[in-house]
Amino acid sequence: IAQKLARTISEKEHAPAFLQTNITVAEFFTKYEDAVKDAMKRRSFETCCEVARVHLLPAFGGLRLKELNREHVQRLYSRKRDAGLSAARVRRVHGVLSSALNHAVRWRLVEHNVCKEVSPPRVPPPEIRPLSLEEAKRFLAAAESDRYHALCVLGLTSGMRLGELGGLFFSDLDLSRRVLHVQRVLITGYGKQTFEAPKTSGSRRNVGLTNLAVEALERHRERHEAEGLPVEGDKLVFANTVG
């Protein structure tokens, strides 16, 4: 065992730091996208492809991957900011490139990830102003006669995300116990919708319902039944409402 371990260490020490290849950035991204398309969530993969197509490949797609350096990347960020791209969007470009280059390092196509040497713009924290109690009351009063009044009530009282509301099945509702179960998220992108698991295990959770939410959901179910629409099993509570 000791001899085998010593041989493995020796081989590792004498192995080339990275493969000698003239692959271009564009060629690398083709390989990268093919490798990660089944590992990423669909929305994340679509974002990766879009960022590469719109921002990265026009800037240095023809450059050899091993020649990509800090100056290339930093200049790209500066140009994008000068062109009016938000700091948050540039940070997303940075995230896509850095993640891809981590794979390049792992595949020994480059020695290190140059994104670790650049300074992406700082993103100021978003200013979030929740509705006041009076504003919330006025909003719900205005939506009282809307067929998706229950969606508005849940959005205000449950803290659920829009995709979580869109992914609710009737089987997720337990109105007698005043609780619903968040099991999935409805994702919309590039002309189609799919269901995906919540981002984290903590996002798959039970949500307690207020009396107002229970009453709104009961009326919503009664309206569905009166219209002959299904209200059981894996049928969407808010069909065709989240785009």
Image (tube, rainbow, N blue to C red):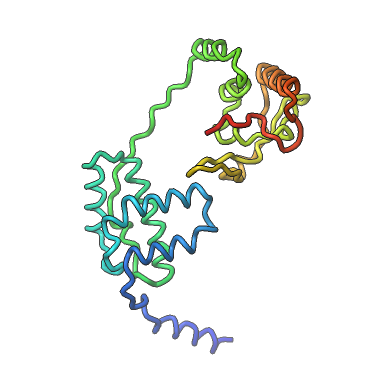
Residue located at (76% from left, 32% from top): 232
**Residue for point 59% across, 16% down:** 146
Along the horizontal axis of the image, is 22 left or right of 11?
Answer: left
Image vertical order of residue 237 relative to residue 47, above or below: above
Q: Position of residue 78 (x, y in %)?
A: 22, 47
Q: Position of residue 130 (x, y in %)?
A: 47, 21
Q: Is residue 80 above or below residue 205?
A: below
Q: Residue furthest right?
A: 176
Q: Residue at x 45, y 85 (%)?
A: 11
The image quadrant where one finds the N terminus is: bottom right
Q: Nearer the viewer, residue 30 or 73?
A: 30
**Is 69 placed left or right of 179 in the picture?**
left
Task: Give coordinates of residue 229: x percent, y percent.
Answer: 72, 27
Q: Number of labelled discs?
A: 0
Residue farthest to the bottom, as pictured: 3
The image quadrant that residue 15 belongs to is bottom left
Q: Nearer the viewer, residue 122 or 195?
A: 195
> Compared to 153, does 205 lie above or below?
below
86 sits left or right of 173 in the view: left
Quarter holding residue 143 = top right
Report the residue at 33% width, 71% height from top. 23
Measured as percent of width and height from the top left, residue 75 is found at 22, 52
Using residue 67 as the reference point, say whether residue 154 is left or right of it: right
Q: Nearer the viewer, residue 9 or 240?
A: 240
Residue 66, quarter of picture: bottom left
